[in-house]
Image (cartoon, helix red, strand yellow):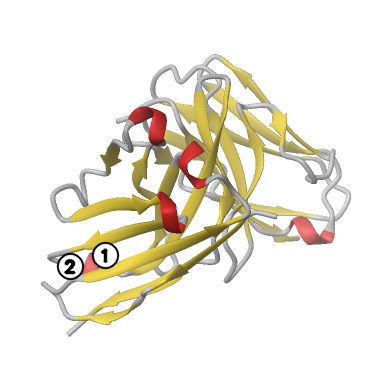
Amino acid sequence: EVQLVESGGGLVQPGGSLRLSCAASGVTFSDYYMDWVRQAPGKGLEWVGRSRNKVYSYTTEYAASVKGRFTISRDDSKNSLDLQMNSLKTEDTAVYYCTRSERYSNAWFPIFWGQGTLVTVSS
Amino acid sequence: DVQLTQSPSFLSASVGDRVTITCRASQGITSSLAWYQQKPGKAPKVLIYAASTLQSGVPSRFSGSASGTEFTLTISSLQAEDFATYYCQQLRTFPLTFGGGTMVEVK
């Protein structure tokens, strides 16, 4: 059974940093694309970024709203995906979800989702 | 960026109703679209991927279809557990984008 468990959320001041982690079990981690998706309180879903798999050298993509401030990294030996968030803004307040994608017909679809971790950016 | 226009934003329905939600893409995305269901306080759950493929374990009353840049999620007979918010997402072009969501509420 695939399980994704996020951790590291909490309260941080504007301009501060936070590092989220996602621990994956039940998978060969290096085979899969992994995404971060967030949801501000009472709002819709927003894609944050993607880490491709080992075949594609773990290259990353980011939403414009976080590019240059957020960095996705992964440690396949630990089955762990991280999201380093710097220069945080109040608008980054959200529940952050880790997802694992599977490939189908030349696209990668986020099939498995973690339970989410809440990040609150406030002074 | 690919804009996904989801309609309606809000839908009031009764158990047993047939429900249709539409997601219109601003440009071609082939079949690279997924549908999710989200209940309050819970993570989204994938229902359909590749526009029309039912995720394992999802009831067969859910179905997806596509015609050009218009995608449809249909619930053939709404059940009590289906009252939730539904989102579409395109996985064709970066940035990956979501529709605005459709809240399905009890009539």
Q: Secondary structure at mark 1?
A: helix
Q: Amino acid at mark 2?
A: Leu
Instruction: Give me the residue at 63% from left, 63% from top.
Output: B39
The numbered mark at residue B39 is none
Q: Secondary structure at mark 2?
A: loop
Instruction: Tell me, yes or no, if residue A44 can be seen here.
Output: no
Residue B87 x %, y %: 55, 46
Instruction: Find out whether the residues at labels 2 and 1 contact each other: C-beta distance under 8 Å.
Output: yes
Return the residue nearer the eye: B2 or B45: B45
Q: Is residue A103 above or below residue A78?
A: above
Instruction: Give me the residue at 55% from left, 45% from top.
Output: A28
Whether labels 2 and 1 belong to a single chain: the reply is: yes
Instruction: Give me the residue at 36% from left, 42% from top.
Output: A51
The residue labelled by disc 1 is A92
Residue B104 horizontal side relative to residue B79, left or right = left
Q: Amino acid at mark 1?
A: Asp
Residue A1 horizontal side relative to residue B38, left or right = right
Q: Is residue B96 above or below residue B82?
A: above
The residue labelled by disc 2 is A88
Which part of the image, by quadrant, shows the C terminus of chain A? bottom left
Residue B24 x %, y %: 50, 28
The crowd level at tag 1 (other Cα within 10 Å; few <14, some 14-19, many 20+) is many
Q: Of all residues shown, which one is farthest toward the top?
A: B68
Q: Of all residues shown, which one is farthest toward the bottom?
A: A123
Instruction: Tell me, yes or no, if residue A48 can be seen here.
Output: yes
Return the residue nearer the eye: B25 or A87: A87
Residue B6 x %, y %: 51, 39
The disc numbered 1 marks a residue on which chain?
A
* Res B27 → quadrant: top left
Separation (CA) of disc 2 from disc 1: 6 Å
* Res A1 → quadrant: bottom right
Q: Is residue A54 above or below residue A38?
A: above
